[in-house]
Image: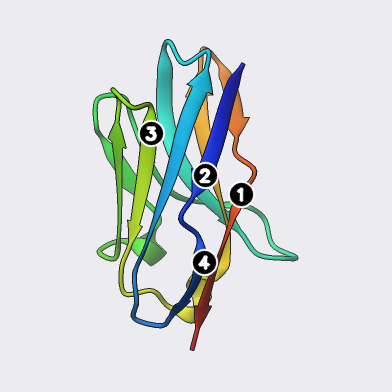
Amino acid sequence: QVQLVESGGGLVQAGGSLRLSCKASGSIFSIGVMGWYRQVPGKQRELVAHITSGGSTNYADSVKGRFTISRDNAKNTVYLQMNSLKFEDTAVYYCNVGRLGWSYWGQGTQVTVSS
C-alpha cells in the first residue's frame, strides 16, 4: 500500500502562484509515474501533468507553460508549481502514483482562483 498526503492548496487571486506537494509513504519501492489530476463538480477528473521516475514529463495543453511538475525521489515527493493561475484552474487537485500495476490517489486539495 502507498499512502499519499497532499498539501499546498488554497485561495489565490488570478495571476498568482501556488505550489502543491504530495508525499508518498508506505510501500514506496518501485514507485513509477507520479502525477496530478484535477476535478470540478460535474466533470470527469482530468490529467494535469505527470512525471516518470526518469524525469520525463507530460502536461495538459491547458497548463503548458504555466505549470511545472517535478519530483524528489529521495523524499518520495512530487510537486506541482502553478504560475499565472486562472479562474478556470479552480478545482480539487489529486495526487496519483503508479506502483507495480496499481494506482493510488491522495485525498485531494482544493485550489480556488478568484477572478
Q: What amino acid is found at the position of numbered circle 2 in the picture?
A: Glu
Query: Farthest residue toward the bottom?
Result: 115
Q: Position of residue 88 (x, y in %)?
A: 51, 76
Q: Secondary structure at mark 4?
A: strand
Q: Nearer the viewer, residue 6 or 41?
A: 6
Q: What amino acid is found at the position of numbered circle 1 in the picture?
A: Gly
Label ID, residue 108: 1
Q: Is residue 28 above or below residue 17?
A: above
Please identify, in this view, whether the residue under mark 4 or under mark 1 is nearer the observer. Answer: 4
Give the residue at x 60% y 29%: 104
- For the residues labelled 4 and 3, the Cα–Cα distance comes to 19 Å
| Image quadrant in which you'd find residue 84 | bottom left
Q: Secondary structure at mark 1?
A: loop
Q: Crowding at label 4, few (<14), some or many (≥20) Cα neighbours within 10 Å?
A: some
Q: Which residue is mark 2?
A: 6
Is the C-beta separation of discs 3 and 2 under 8 Å? no
Q: Nearer the viewer, residue 18 or 87?
A: 18
Is the C-beta separation of discs 2 and 1 under 8 Å? yes
Q: Which residue is mark 3?
A: 77
- For the residues labelled 3 and 1, the Cα–Cα distance comes to 15 Å
Q: Which residue is mark 4?
A: 10
Q: Secondary structure at mark 3?
A: strand
Give the mark count: 4
Q: What amino acid is found at the position of numbered circle 3 in the picture?
A: Thr
